Image (cartoon, rainbow, N blue to C red):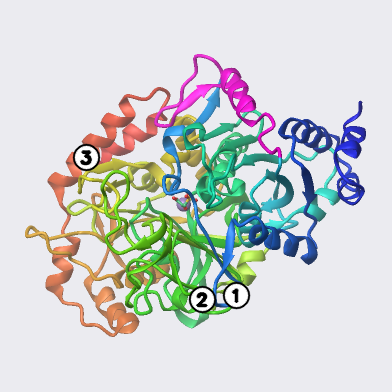
């Protein structure tokens, strides 16, 4: 039977008409195959209408995946106590037999497709399947990538409405041969709290070959919101094949002198200051997590893949994060996840106000001192508790840049690591190759007490993208280098480190100093500030920083502070070059420029 005929049998009339309106046989076949396989009780197809979006939100409440909070439009969602972060152990990129990728888990494609299909057979019995259409990147643009998500979680679909641009009309408009990304998710069997129950059978399989990601028995956003990190693995592969960049980067506007607008991207491993940089209140955010960068007429142009924020809520307080605080306390649509709730109000660790001693959180009914099965005390909110909200509600969002179909010209690209003793607070690369190799491809970050038992262990994380590296790292870096060669004008590349310490272990910078580094980088993009040439790139001159500290933060900046911060730490830098070379020497097929540039820097 033809796919459309099968769909007519599977869907009720109203839903079938919505699908029929899209003239795409590949889509029809995909839907028919999977709806038959997943066996949902009912199927709802989301068009771009407000009404359909409202239906999904209502279903998230109806099925108990979300609960209303006191403030209008605020809801809370809980994930299983053991399903609170990206599940690296059960996530794999599928590859042909015998192939492997460095640094990410790979599995045999054929066997794994079989395994995941088995896990998903009939998994939606008794449930409702939501078929959702979105696009990555601005609509109707050179960046647009259409995607379809199947999920039995109304929470996942609801999150996607806040985070991505609707794509049903795009699917209708785009031709029959349009390539699209596919995500198939089931939360699996749910427990009485409506969280995924069969965590031992949790799987996230990324089939780059088939442009498809499968995710089952999990709800946490990073494992399920298809268009986020799942799509990211697919677009990295596509970008490398097609010669553009799909990056784990924020996109922001830094405001220069006389109203000049300069756009920067930034890649930082987690806990290195990515969000707090993108959210500096007097600059303007375009995106906080994922950026596509395309060469257009010799210029690198960037666009936010998403239109919302799935942000970490821990530590957000009115003093350090006035803008996010304000957004979180306004009656705009927000999903809070894995926070503490008492009397309809959400609370989280480090919010700077008193937190109740009891309530409901990711562990169920919670009281201060409650311990988990392992005997560990349960904090009020999970450290990866999050908020999901659209960027349009941020007073400092640059919405014009966000929806610009041509994206924005990228003036600078920032790579931010965390180390106590090696990189200066800010510096500029000599050129594209130098920046890509000694900054991006050499990015490391120290583990923090919050994330791992051991503090201060340096972890290699090139371009902050290692978890998602669905292609060979050597190919990824080669693509980066070639990308620069396609440009008439390459973005300037910078490296920052907000976490430098002195010999006694004291921090050398304050939290907000990064705002000064941004202004300096903005000037450098336009050749409006001098710099000192060092063996590792250009560093700021004291006088410029002193003036900027005064202008931006109204702070004095002493020469003594400057000298401590910007002294080139030769032994540490040499040791770092050694470490990075060692890593790349073990990989096959790394561009030879990488070793040459590192060697030059050593000399
Ligand atoms: C990250 O961990 O890099 C995130 C959140 O942005 S997640 O969606 O879990 O990947
Ligand atoms: Mn991220």
Position of the N terminus by quadrant: top right
Residue 332: which numbered mark, if any?
Answer: 1
Q: Is residue 364 above or below residue 259?
A: above
| Residue on which the image places disc 3 | 602
SS of the residue at dot 1? Answer: loop
Residue that lies at the very extreme toward the left in this rendered image: 504
Image point (24%, 76%), residue name: 543
Dot placed on the residue nearer the N-terminal end, 1 or 2? 2
Image point (32%, 44%), residue name: 373
Contact (CB < 8 A) between labels 1 and 2?
yes
| Residue on which the image places disc 2 | 327
Task: From the top left corner, tell me how far across and down residue 230 is, in percent.
Answer: 56, 42
Q: Which span is picked out in magenta?
A: 96-125
Task: From the top left corner, tell me how far across and down residue 46 is, in percent.
Answer: 77, 54
**Label 3 CA crowd tier, 10 Å (few <14, some 14–19, many 20+):** some
Mark 3 vs mark 1, CA separation in Å: 52 Å
Inspect the magenta stretch and tell me whether residue 107 lies in it.
yes
SS of the residue at dot 3? Answer: helix
Inspect the magenta stretch and tell me whether residue 87 lies in it.
no
Name the one closer to the observer, 381 or 303. 381
**Label 1 CA crowd tier, 10 Å (few <14, some 14–19, many 20+):** some
Dot placed on the residue nearer the N-terminal end, 3 or 1? 1
């Amino acid at each position: 039977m033809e796919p459309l005929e099968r769909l007519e049998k599977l869907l009720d009339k109203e839903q079938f008409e919505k699908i029929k309106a899209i003239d795409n046989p590949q889509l029809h076949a995909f839907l028919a195959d999977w709806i038959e396989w997943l066996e949902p009780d009912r199927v709802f197809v989301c068009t771009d209408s407000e009404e359909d979006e409202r239906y999904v939100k209502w279903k998230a409440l109806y099925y108990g995946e979300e609960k209303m909070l006191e403030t209008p439009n605020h809801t809370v969602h809980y994930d299983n106590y053991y399903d609170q972060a990206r599940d690296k152990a059960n996530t794999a990129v599928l590859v042909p037999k015998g192939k492997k990728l460095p640094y990410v888990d790979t599995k045999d494609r054929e066997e794994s497709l079989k395994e995941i299909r088995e896990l998903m057979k009939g998994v939606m019995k008794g449930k409702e399947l939501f078929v959702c259409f979105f696009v990555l990147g601005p609509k109707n643009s050179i960046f647009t990538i259409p995607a379809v998500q199947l999920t039995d979680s109304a929470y996942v679909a609801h999150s996607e409405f806040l985070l991505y641009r609707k794509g049903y009309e795009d699917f209708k408009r785009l031709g029959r041969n349009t390539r699209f990304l596919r995500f198939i998710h089931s939360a699996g069997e749910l427990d009485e709290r409506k969280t995924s129950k069969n965590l031992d059978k949790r799987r996230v399989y990324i089939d780059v070959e088939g442009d498809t990601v499968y995710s089952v028995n999990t709800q946490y956003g990073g494992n399920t919101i298809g268009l986020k990190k799942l799509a990211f693995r697919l677009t990295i592969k596509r970008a490398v094949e097609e010669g553009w960049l799909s990056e784990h980067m924020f996109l922001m506007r830094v405001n220069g002198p006389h109203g000049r607008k300069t756009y920067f991207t930034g890649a930082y491993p987690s806990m290195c200051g990515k969000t707090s940089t993108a959210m500096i209140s007097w600059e303007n955010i375009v995106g906080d997590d994922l950026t596509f960068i395309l060469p257009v007429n010799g210029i690198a142009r960037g666009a936010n893949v998403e239109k919302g924020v799935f942000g970490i809520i821990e530590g957000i307080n009115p003093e350090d994060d006035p803008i996010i605080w304000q957004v979180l306390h306004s009656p705009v649509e927000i999903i809070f996840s894995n926070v503490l709730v008492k009397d309809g109000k959400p609370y989280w660790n480090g919010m700077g106000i008193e937190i109740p001693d009891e309530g409901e959180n990711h562990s169920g009914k919670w009281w201060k001192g409650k311990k988990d099965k392992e005997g560990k005390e349960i904090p009020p909110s999970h450290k990866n508790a999050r908020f999901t909200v659209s960027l349009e509600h941020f007073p400092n969002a640059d919405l014009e840049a966000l929806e610009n179909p041509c994206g924005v010209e990228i003036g600078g690209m920032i790579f931010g690591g965390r180390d106590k003793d090696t990189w200066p607070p800010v510096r500029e690369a000599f050129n594209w190759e130098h920046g890509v190799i000694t900054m991006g491809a050499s990015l490391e970050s120290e583990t923090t007490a919050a994330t791992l038992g051991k503090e201060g262990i340096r972890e290699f994380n090139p371009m902050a993208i290692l978890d998602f590296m669905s292609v060979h790292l050597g190919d990824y870096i080669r693509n980066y280098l070639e990308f620069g060669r396609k440009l008439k004008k390459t973005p300037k590349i910078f490296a920052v480190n907000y976490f430098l310490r002195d010999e006694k272990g004291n921090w050398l910078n304050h939290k907000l100093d990064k705002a000064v580094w941004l202004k300096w980088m903005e000037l450098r993009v336009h050749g409006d500030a001098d710099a000192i040439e060092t063996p590792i790139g250009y560093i700021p001159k004291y006088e410029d920083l002193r003036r900027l500290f005064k202008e931006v933060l109204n702070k004095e900046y002493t020469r003594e502070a400057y000298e401590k911060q910007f002294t080139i730490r030769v032994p540490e830098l040499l040791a770092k070059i050694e470490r990075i070379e060692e890593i790349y020497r073990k990989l096959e097929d790394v561009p030879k420029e990488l070793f040459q540039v590192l060697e030059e820097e050593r000399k």
